[in-house]
Amino acid sequence: MSTSVIQPTDSIESTTAPLLEIKNLRVVLPILEGDLVAADGVNIQIKPGKTLGLVGESGCGKTMTAQSILQIAPKIAKTSGQILLHYADRPPTDIVALGKNDPELLRIRGGECAMIFQEPMTSFSPVHTIGNQLIEAILLHRTSDKKEAREIAIAMLDKVGIPAPAETLKKYPHHLSGGMRQRAMIAMALSSRPRLLIADEPTTALDVTVQAQVLRLMRDLQRDLGMAILYISHDLGVIARMADEVAVMYMGSIVEHAPVRELFRSVKHPYTKGLMGSAPRIGKKSGEPLATIMGNVPIPINKPTACGFFPRCPVGIAGICDQVVPPLVEVAPGHKSACFRYPQVLAAAGLESGTTNE
Amino acid sequence: MLSYTVRRLGYMIVNLTLISIVCFYIINLPPGSFIETYSTQLDAAGSPASQAQLDYLTARYGLDQPLYVQYWNWIVPLVTQGDFGYSFEWQQPVWTLLADRLWLTIIFSIVSMVFVYAVSIPVALYSATHQYSFGDYSVNLLGVIGLAVPNFLLALLLLVGSAKFFGVTPTGLYSPQYMNAPWSWDKFVDLLIHLPVPVVVVGLAGTAATIRILRSQLLDEFQKQYVITARAKGVPERRLLMKYPFRVALNPIISTAGHLLPEIVSGSTIVAIVLGLPTIGPLLLRSIIAQDTYVAASSLMMLGVLTVVGVVMSDILLTILDPRVRMNRTN
Ligand SMILES: Nc1ncnc2c1ncn2[C@@H]1O[C@H](COP(=O)(O)OP(=O)(O)O)[C@@H](O)[C@H]1O
Ligand SMILES: [Mg+2]
């Protein structure tokens, strides 16, 4: 890869050392029907203080990838590859290699990397108060002093815009609305001042106005606290508002990766194009049907060695796309794609561009 | 919370009233009465009673009166003076017959319940956290056997087995010398020694059922988002298990605890007969056969009280423990 042509502002591999580096992550779920490959050689980097958007249709493996970072994927999942958490003053930790009771893992979970989830209804234990669960997180990572922990909890609830924070501590999750619960969730995640916040579709279950508020809140908190965010969504519109960089995932693989503006300026993968077509946009005439991607997301069991998108792809090249797995390579400065429509991809797979006759 | 408890106790009284009426009605459903059964017995014994004698008894016990009058005559002294009536067959106040058996039934049931939970909770925790392991499969297999084997059969097997191998039959709840002795420390110790066999026999099915319920409940909870949330924030596994899924999985166990009590009480009747336990069950059976109305009605009533009290206790407990239930019930 020629780094010389990359402009520093738009680059993926900029000079800042990454905070988290996922290398060749493979998550396999051995289920009855066979081996389900939820993540298939994922490579992504998250930079300190920046937001990486991970986008793709539901079922493409976003959650499994994110959960692997904290080793909270389902018990049956077999994870391989490396997930390196970098430090300023010591060598990186490979999270994949940590044992499940390793104190280092418990310190990273909720401490270095915190996570918020899609379902604000079920993310809290229904039989413990918000305060109980929030203070528990603070006692695990911030302080061992109960009184101080309570003060931090109140300050955090206040920070995420929950009215009457002290009273809210005594409330149970079912007393709070979905939006308030998600705010409390964010407060809990950020209470340990994590360096990375993993947000797995945090607004998908909320209605549109609340969604906008929560998105704004997260941006504000990022500006204040400076954490990096891995923002997961199936909605490119939300990703466009939140992310600095975008990784597009399909069937367990990253198929396109670019800085957000570059991505929207010139899409370089037919799948991403399909995603954009299926996103509702303001200005589109109502009644005009949304373009959708043909077919459904296939279940990634016994994946063929081919481009996973080929069966649904409007521009697929028979004889190539259904024979060879396209590698993810740079096709424009700072812009990676895994589509054989680009000669760089063909070259990286050892194929000549001459073979692409339409 | 207080108002809920008061309301619940109010319902309980209504419940018990209805139970007493139904009990009394059902007891009197079979044709004939104690007097007829009694005269048939005398006939069979070869010394038939005269009609005058039978009429006298019928009038004396009020058996010639309509059923609601008989009910009234039974329930009023019961409520106002704690007088359960008189046993035709035993020629004793019912309470004298019932008192000892009632206490034994309560002690026996509570010990059985403690046994059920003391065994099933740790086993279910192990089984659920080691799903699909050898231990888990073994627990499941034993559970199926525990559920499938009728407890009277198990009782018989234990009787035969211990007679054969130890030369003793573990029947009754006391050694003979304590049978009619007044309560003493020694008698109590003797009772404790006799408890395990019947407790295991009676508790086995309940234990197996509770293991199954709690195990699947736990496995369900493990998948829940709030467990993943807790794990994601760095709660160590063991603490996580006890604080979150176990705590939530316990709720249905608590709410069914009230039903386990009557199950033990009624389910133990056959075992009590096989093992010769001096609990209420055998007395009830005997009194129904003899149409000894007041004994039967009072025994049934006692079992009803145990059931209702058990259910109310577990309801109140659940209300204290589960804020969701509390919200629904106290608003
Ligand atoms: N607990 C599980 N058991 C079996 N398969 C699962 C489980 N969780 C997810 N999967 C499968 O793994 C794939 C990736 O799922 P997921 O990471 O949740 O997708 P996304 O978050 O992008 O919607 C899907 O095909 C899904 O069906
Ligand atoms: Mg998901």
Image: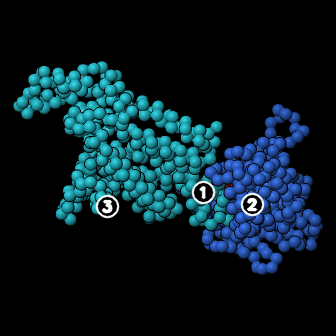
Chain colours: A blue, B cyan
The crowd level at tag 2 (other Cα within 10 Å; few <14, some 14-19, many 20+) is: many
Residue in view at x 88 percent, y 70 percent? A14
Residues at marks 1 and 3 touching, judged by CB atoms closer than 8 Å: no
Please give the chain letter of the residue carrying mark 2.
Answer: A
The crowd level at tag 1 (other Cα within 10 Å; few <14, some 14-19, many 20+) is: many
**Residue reaching furthest to the bottom:** A90
User: Could you say which disc has been placed on residue B185 in the image?
Assistant: 3
Q: Nearer the viewer, residue A159 or B300?
A: B300
User: Could you say which disc has been placed on residue A179 in the image?
Assistant: none
Q: Is mark 2 within 8 Å of ligand 2?
A: no
Q: Is residue A255 visible?
A: no
Give the percent coordinates (x, y) of residue A218.
83, 55
Q: Nearer the viewer, residue A62 or B306?
A: B306
- Which of discs 2 and 3 lies nearer the camera? The answer is 3
**Residue reaching furthest to the left:** B46
- Which of discs 1 and 3 lies nearer the camera? The answer is 3
How far, Cα to Cα, is label 2 from label 1?
21 Å
Work out whether B279 lies above or below A332: above
Give the percent coordinates (x, y) of residue B91.
20, 36
Q: Nearer the viewer, residue B126 or B80?
A: B80
